[in-house]
Amino acid sequence: MLAAIGTSHAKTILLGEHAVVYGEPAIAIPISTIRLRAEITPQPGGQQTVTSAFYNGALAAAAHTNFAGVATLIRQLLVTFDAQDQGFNLNIISDLPPERGMGSSAATAVAIVRAFYNAFATDLPHAVLLRWADVSERQIHGNPSGIDAATVSATRPQCSFGATSRKTSRCPKTGCSSLLIPAFRGRPSWPSRRWRHATTPMCRHGKKSPGLVWSPAKQQSQWPRMIW
């Protein structure tokens, strides 16, 4: 094992908070200025310790604490690298406030996975990273949508199609320039009668289209094209 570092950052859900775990679409944005850092330092004697704002002490004693989900993740990582007896100290330094909807648990998992893979000099595909993060997220949250882990490890907004499909993808740079979400009652005065009774998002097609051209975006496959 080498001394190693893993990083992640915060996120916020722009659309679909809570509803995403019930199978509804959501859009989340990474906040790269609010960071989390996991530092692994090998230590002799086989002692495995954790230093953080959430938990301080031996990894073995974390099973019945709020750190239990992350502890399970760490133990499974050690098994994968055949390093169950390897001593180390894991120091977690976080600017993310816990339990405030900013992805603290997912950011912790992502940074730890990255740190362990760096400590064992192993390549880490992004899909593998998300599967590992899901280990602790499932224990902590029960039925995570996956959008938290996807966003705290990403540099661009992420679109999720909910817990039923567990499909998350980055929002591409091309597509519509604006997005309108109908969320009103009564008679709207703008943009036009065309979507006065709309129940699905409406997409504006940018500078290349003549005038204000809005069209319904009814299919989930169109959602990633509606921002950025």
Image (spheres, helix red, strand yellow):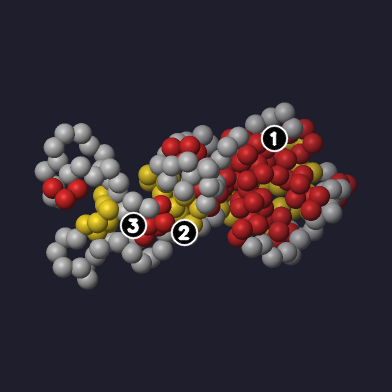
Q: Residue at x 73, y 46 (%)?
A: 74
Mark 2 sits on what residue?
170
Asked if residue 89 shows in the view, the reply is no
Asked if residue 41 shows in the view, the reply is yes
Q: Find the distance from the CA under tag 1 to the CA under tag 2.
A: 30 Å
The quadrant of the rendering that contains the C terminus is bottom left
Q: Find the distance from the CA under tag 1 to the CA under tag 3.
A: 39 Å
Mark 1 sits on what residue?
68
Indicate the amino acid at tag 2: Arg
Q: Secondary structure at mark 3?
A: helix
Ranked by sequence position, the earlier of labels 1 and 2 is 1
Q: Residue at x 53, y 36 (%)?
A: 98
Image check: 61 left or right of 85? left
Q: Nearer the viewer, mark 1 or mark 3?
A: 3
Name which quarter of the figure residue 68 lies in. top right
Indicate the amino acid at tag 3: Met
Ranked by sequence position, the earlier of labels 1 and 3 is 1
The quadrant of the rendering that contains the N terminus is bottom right
Q: Residue at x 47, y 50 (%)?
A: 160
Mark 3 sits on what residue?
226
In the foreground, 42 or 149: 149
**Residues at marks 3 and 2 touching, judged by CB atoms closer than 8 Å:** no
